[in-house]
Image (tube, rainbow, N blue to C red):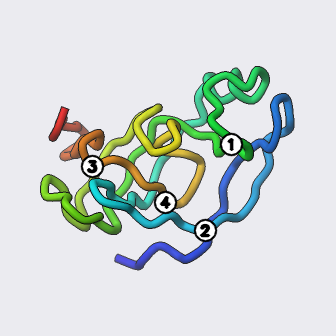
């Protein structure tokens, strides 16, 4: 499995009512209790459009859009024992450091306590 690149492409909007744009940003590194997930599938949700138009649920600009996704644990932060590199996981809206977990990114950090392990097309709540 290849490591996540140091930079990735993201889908964001930079102000309330502003257009969605493709941009580049650094791949985040997981802090204690977090994992880095290499996103394989991500949904752009109606909530993203609502947030783009109204600013609701936006913690800061630019805001990276994308909700509800799945991927593979790429890196494990200090203190994480329930997940390991290579685990397939599902991540959902409002479960990451900045609310939108899956984000339209190539990789994102997510609290390991809020990640669900995915197996054979299903996911199991490992820590909820």
Please state, as top left, top right, bottom left or bottom right, where the N terminus lies in the image: bottom left
Q: Which residue is mark 2?
A: 26
| Spot occupied by residue 84 in the image (x, y as percentages of width and height) | 19, 63
Please state, as top left, top right, bottom left or bottom right, where the C terminus lies in the image: top left
Nearest-to-viewer mark from 4 and 2: 2
Q: Is residue 118 left or right of residue 91?
A: left
- Element type at mark 3: helix
Tell me if mark 4 has few (under 14), some (14-19) or many (20+) residues whose alpha carbon lies within 10 angstroms of its own.
many
For residue 112, the mark is 3
Nearest-to-viewer mark from 4 and 3: 3
Nearest-to-viewer mark from 4 and 1: 1
- Element type at mark 4: strand
Tell me if mark 2 has few (under 14), some (14-19) or many (20+) residues whose alpha carbon lies within 10 angstroms of its own.
few
Q: Which residue is mark 4?
A: 107
In space, the residues marked 3 and 2 are separated at their CA atoms by: 21 Å
- Element type at mark 2: strand
Say which label, 4 or 2, has the lower sequence index.
2
Q: Which residue is mark 1?
A: 63
Q: Is residue 12 left or right of residue 91?
A: right
Cβ–Cβ below 8 Å for labels 1 and 3? no
In space, the residues marked 4 and 2 are separated at their CA atoms by: 10 Å
Say which label, 1 or 3, has the lower sequence index.
1
In space, the residues marked 4 and 3 are separated at their CA atoms by: 14 Å
Say which label, 4 or 3, has the lower sequence index.
4
């Amino acid at each position: 499995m290849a490591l996540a690149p140091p930079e990735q492409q993201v889908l964001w909007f930079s102000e309330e009512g502003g257009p969605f744009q493709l941009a580049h940003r650094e791949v985040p590194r997981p802090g204690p209790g977090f994992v880095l997930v290499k996103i394989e599938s991500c949904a752009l949700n109606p909530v993203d459009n609502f947030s783009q138009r109204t600013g609701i649920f936006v913690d800061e600009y630019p805001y990276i859009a994308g909700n509800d996704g799945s991927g593979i644990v790429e890196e494990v932060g200090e203190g994480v024992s329930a997940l390991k590199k290579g685990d397939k996981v599902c991540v959902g809206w409002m479960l990451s450091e900045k609310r939108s977990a899956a984000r339209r990114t190539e990789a994102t950090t997510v609290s390991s306590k809020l990640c669900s392990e995915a197996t054979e097309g299903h996911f199991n709540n490992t820590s909820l």
